[in-house]
Amino acid sequence: MVEYRSFPARDRRRPVLAHLARRVVGYAHEGLEPGTHIGMPSTSLTLVISLGDRLEVEADRTRPYATCLGGLTTRPVRIHHGASMRGVQLDLSPSAARILFGTPAGVLPQAVELAEVLGRPGVTLREQMHEAPSWGQMVDLLEDHFARLARPYRPPPELAEAWRIIHASGGQATVAVLAETVGWSSRRLQTHFRRECGISPKEAALIVRFNRTRQMIAGGGRSLAQIAATCGYADQAHLTRDWRRFAGTAPSRWPEEDPLAFVQDATDTTMVESSHERTHRPQHLDRDLRR
């Protein structure tokens, strides 16, 4: 049995989540063959709240997590699972690190227990969600907890614009073009981008392009050669090299190796708020504040 419950990321009833989350999904799997799920590199922070057994996550080291927070990285994580899994996953904008945790995304490791970042509130959130009788009430708890944690923050407009262009170009914008567009030197852009996000602009672009191929493979109907050409790779071999770097496997083998291969389907597009989010974000997040 496989159950997914996806919640609109732009729900006006939950304005803090609407501001910070690109995707919120509840999942429940029963009767799985024990195996390993590959958590692909992404331009989202990933927060997974396990409501069943702890997650056995292989990142810098292998350890169990009750609630796993992942920073931006170019390396995959491997999640070893048994026959059942249940929990909630959020894909958060990089700015969520400043707003919720008071720290740039750039200092977050590949995987960390949420309680190590938040202290007791990180434990309380999972306990309360575990007792919630429905998926909707779990998401309401997330909204309430995040509203209490949220603090005003607005990233530098130059970084926000560079982030937007990287995604709008499908990861094909060069660092030189980004720097010229935002009015910074390439060196300044790379320094501030890495400090804030934990990856460089070039790495972010490579991840965006890689994730575009992953979504196309998941969608079916195209050969790997066609996908490589569409996404700007020199050839299929170039695409395969990126897959081995970012996923640790070949694109042709991914669906067979990972029984949960098509779970990670968020679209990573914004570092900060869209026009919709500017309209509906909480008022205390709407102030122009210095960093």
Image: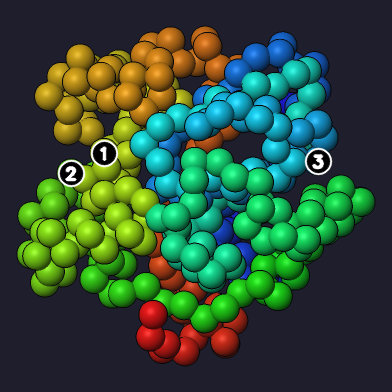
Q: Is residue 138 visible?
A: no
Q: Quadrant of residue 155?
A: bottom left
Q: Is residue 9 visible?
A: yes
Q: Secondary structure at mark 1?
A: helix
The span from disc 1 to disc 3 (Cα, nearest Å) is 33 Å
Residue at image location 61% in from the left, 74% down from the top: 150
Q: Which mark is residue 172?
A: 2
Image coords of residue 280 (percent x, y): 55, 78
- The residue tagged 1 is 206
Image coords of residue 113 (percent x, y): 66, 46
Residues packed near mark 1 inside 10 Å, few (<14), some (14 to 19) or many (20 plus): many
Marks 2 and 1, the one that precedes in the sequence = 2
- The residue tagged 3 is 51
Nearer to me, 85 or 252:
85
Residue at image location 60% in from the left, 45% down from the top: 112
Dot 2 amino acid type: Gln
Q: Is residue 196 left or right of residue 239?
A: right
